[in-house]
Amino acid sequence: MTVDLLWRNVPCDFELPDNEVQVWRAMLDRPLSRVQILHQTLSEDEQQRAARFYFDHDRQHYIVARGLLRALLGHYLKVEPAQLRFTYNAYGKPRLVGQPDQPSLSFNLSHSGGFVLYAFARNRTVGIDVEQMRTNLDYEQMAEHVFSPYERQEFCRLAAEQKPDGFFNAWTRKEAYIKARGLGLALPLDQFDVSLHPDQPARLLKTHSEPLAAEQWSLCALTMGSGYKAALVVEGHAWQLRCWQWPDELSLGI
């Protein structure tokens, strides 16, 4: 794989070649007028879900995250965002219903704090995760519950100042992998190993129940800036990564 971790301004005529994985980063805080425009592109069930959020802040972030997903998918597929329909597997992973006759489009999204990330690829599965690095967590206790024995051992070896980075390195990488697999927690978090040391590359090291699976997936860390960690998991290895920054002003026809 070829990885370019710079967040670039997107060209007006961007496309998604078969050998590329494209990741988008966007801010969730948008003017209310823009939120209302995005709300109009959502399906009835998405609008109903948005209405169930108690806090306006959370409701607006959900609308923006789903609305931008529709805008991007609509651009890639050359259809109106409001026309897109989703179905979900038993573990909640979405996929498109009735894609046009073109290479299958895989996507995944994650949001935390003020950011949302999207991953897109053709003919290969992707998973993505972003986490705001909260400081009010008991890292050691959480590691005991969600890390594999190997990861717990590596985590314990970290210096105290390295543990926040190490914890969120592992957490985002593990979340991105189970999202790519589409199995939710039916794939136990302690049944596979990822690298977590701040000075080591991101890697899926071992899958205990499926010994060959680790060789079938690529994992990379994404650069997010202070206070955030993010990871991307992609099926296969022969691909290139491009990272796009959503512009401050909404585009793509909305």
Image: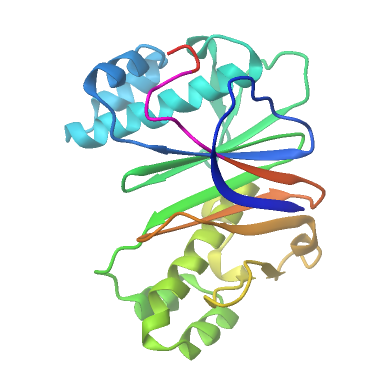
List x then y, in percent, for residue 147. Answer: 51, 73
The residue furthest left is 55
The figure's colour scheme reads rainbow
Q: Residue at x 25, y 16 (%)?
A: 33
List x then y, in percent, for residue 138. Answer: 30, 75
Q: Is residue 183 visible?
A: no
Q: Residue at x 37, y 30 (%)?
A: 248
Q: Is residue 55 left or right of residue 246?
A: left
Q: Residue at x 66, y 67 (%)?
A: 203
**Height in image: 12 above or below 52?**
above
Nearest the viewer among 98 and 157 is 157
Where is residue 243, by image quadrant?
Answer: top right
Name the main secondary structure of what is drawn in magenta. Answer: loop
**Height in image: 142 above or below 234?**
below
For the record, the magenta segment spans: 244-251
Q: Quick one: quadrant of the C terminus?
A: top left
Specify whether residue 247 is painted magenta. yes
Nearest the viewer among 26 and 51 is 26
Q: Is residue 52 left or right of residue 236?
A: left
List x then y, in percent, for residue 10. Answer: 56, 30
